[in-house]
Image: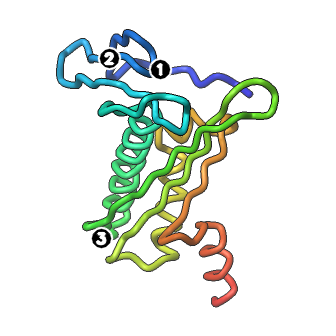
Amino acid sequence: MSVTSLKRVLYTAEAVTEGGRSGHGRTSDGRLEVELSVPENLGGKGGPGTNPEQLFAIAYAACFQSTMLSVAQRGRFDAGDSRFTSRVDLGPTGHGGFGLRVALDLHAPHLAPAVAAQLMAEADGRCPYSNATRGNIPVVLTVDGTPIEEIVKNDQGAA
């Protein structure tokens, strides 16, 4: 696997954390400040704070949706009122470490499922989070719960 190099840096986000999963994080510009808590089912106290998986779920979905909206606009498709539900699963890998698994589900009321699936496939090739995770963690893309590969296959069979 090759490492993606950048031709130039467009933006840099900087944050400082203290205390790990049960600590505190803050961006250098002060726009985001969060308390972190370990969920009970991971052996923590629960607590009022968020956790890295929740932050990743929001960040990935927001980035992916922005990419998909750009792709839709370029193709003159109405992706208005669309929303993503993202799930980030954390679990043991079986060889001493832990890994992640991601699911992104699109609900787009103004798009036919085949169009939505195509837009997601194109966004997946452009989204920085998708490019960063590709080959590293499983990512499942669905439209209203149906995998995009299944939608494309069924659409081709209907043609």
Give the labeled residue for mark 2: 24
Give the residue displayed 22% in from the left and 25% down from the top: 32
Badge 1 element: loop
Instruction: Identify which amino acid the numbered label 3 is placed on.
Output: Asp
Q: Are marks 3 and 2 in contact (CB under 8 Å)?
A: no
Badge 3 element: loop
Give the labeled residue for mark 1: 7
Give the labeled residue for mark 3: 78
Closer to the eye: label 1 or 2: 2
Label 1 Cα neighbours within 10 Å, binned few <14 / some 14-19 / many ≥20: few
x, y percent for residue 143: 49, 69
Q: Nearer the viewer, residue 50 or 6?
A: 50
Determine the CA span between mark 1 and mark 3.
32 Å
Instruction: Identify which amino acid the numbered label 1 is placed on.
Output: Lys
Q: Are marks 1 and 3 in contact (CB under 8 Å)?
A: no
Q: Nearer the viewer, residue 49 or 127?
A: 49
Number of marks: 3
x, y percent for residue 37: 39, 27
Q: Along the polypeptide, which appears first: circle 1 or circle 3?
A: 1
Quadrant the N terminus occupies? top right
